[in-house]
Amino acid sequence: MRRDALRIFRAALAAADPTKAVLRHVRVEGKTLIAGRRRYRLGRYRRVLVLGGGKAGASMARALERLLGRRIAGGVVNVKYGHVARLGRVELVECGHPVPDAAGVEGTRRIAALAAEAGEDDLALCVISGGASALMPAPAHPVTLGEKQETTRLLLACGATIHEINAVRKHISALKGGQLARLAAPATVVSLLLSDVIGDDLDVIGSGPMAPDSSSFAAARSVLDKYRLEERVPRSVAERIRQGCAGEIPETPKPGDSVFSRVQNLIVGSNRLAVDEAAAEARRLGYRTMVLSTFVEGETREVARVHAAIAREIIAAGRPLRTPACVISGGETTVTVRGTGLGGRNQEFALAAAIDLDGLANTVVLSGGTDGTDGPTDAAGAVADGVTLRRARELGLDARRFLDDNDSYHFFEPLGDLVKTGPTNTNVMDIRLLLVGA
């Protein structure tokens, strides 16, 4: 069953391949670029430029090079360290994630310059995928990179959702929340999006650099209030948001703004596609399969307890499925960090589930990030079952102590139960699997 869980997870990763995702939605027929339902006559444009950022940026840019070749005049795309590909026309800038760094700032400066110099007769192809928010940092005056880094750390540790985090990040940035579209106008823009957010909201994917922003300075302030961060974030951040709420700083561009009149935003891949392929693979392996939801969010430990409860219900009553059963969920949970250990939301899910499944026979859980990295670790996630805690006790490992310290990585490492894929060059949130045997 552990092998089956890994096969199902890898099937989900294959479905989320960014190159294939782009090629499913974008093609060239003769001298016409077709993106979704829109057509662009390439002969009308002086230059074709590629820009953007995200963990899948290299693979998405590679797809565009395959389609357009020498028609691409150049480009700059920011990617996470190690998430690279061999390209001929587009330059990749490796930089920091989830906390932005100086390399990201420099790469973003070049992306912004490329957008700003694009004219009415240019076609800009923008690739945006999960991680773009951190990988395309452009701190807005008077916020510095260090202050933006500190704000990001606070937001990641407090348990805020990606929507809440991005509401703040967009309003301390000079590029996010549609502001890259403002720079690129009046060029024609096709923005290709690989979604890593629940609901596939255009203005949340990568903080929506090419999309109208539905959030506001007031929304950013409410996030700081909700998590009691107003006194903890750097003074420049709190002051900028205060000035924005007072109308002293212009808002990000909203729906109906003329800067979007020549912009197409097209979603080419999402968590739903990966989950669907995982379900298909589970059925091929002989499991009765149900997709629980691709909208799962909330505190990781609570989500893990729900999944463990479903496993017990399957064993006790054959509901919602009879064995052999596979229950799949997608989305992205959050961890409120209270300890000092190492881990990520997927490893913490597996550890919390293992505690609730202790002693339960023929049950396996796997949780993994489709980007191949879970938190600040080299693992995508972890796998656990009903005997995980027994094996841990034999090694002197106290599961609850590790969970309390948010140290799931060092719990699973000696057990050999970390799931390591290496960089996948994609990112469509997380996949969680629950297998219950006959």
Image (tube, grey):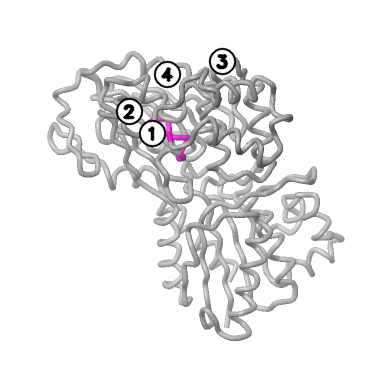
Q: Earlier in the sequence, mark 1 or mark 4?
A: 4
- What mark, if any, has residue 112 been given in the picture? 4
Q: Is residue 378 left or right of residue 279?
A: right
Camera-nearest label, 1 or 2: 2
The residue pinned by badge 2 equals: 257
Camera-nearest label, 3 or 2: 2
Which residue appears farthest toward the bottom when viewing the image?
317
Which residue appears farthest toward the front when viewing the image?
246
Distance between the Cα atoms at labels 1 and 3? 21 Å
Q: Nearer the viewer, residue 278 or 36?
A: 36
Q: Is residue 87 left or right of residue 437?
A: left
- Do residues under tags 1 and 3 come within 8 Å of each other at their CB atoms? no
As helix, strand or loop, the secondary structure at mark 1 comes to loop
Alpha-carbon neighbours of circle 1 within 10 Å: few (<14), some, or many (≥20)? many
Residue at x 62%, y 46% (from the top left corner): 374
The residue pinned by badge 3 equals: 141
Image quadrant where residue 194 sits: top left
The residue pinned by badge 1 equals: 212
Distance between the Cα atoms at labels 1 and 4? 17 Å
Residue 3: image x %, image y %? 56, 66
As helix, strand or loop, the secondary structure at mark 3 comes to loop
Q: Nearer the viewer, residue 187 or 311?
A: 187
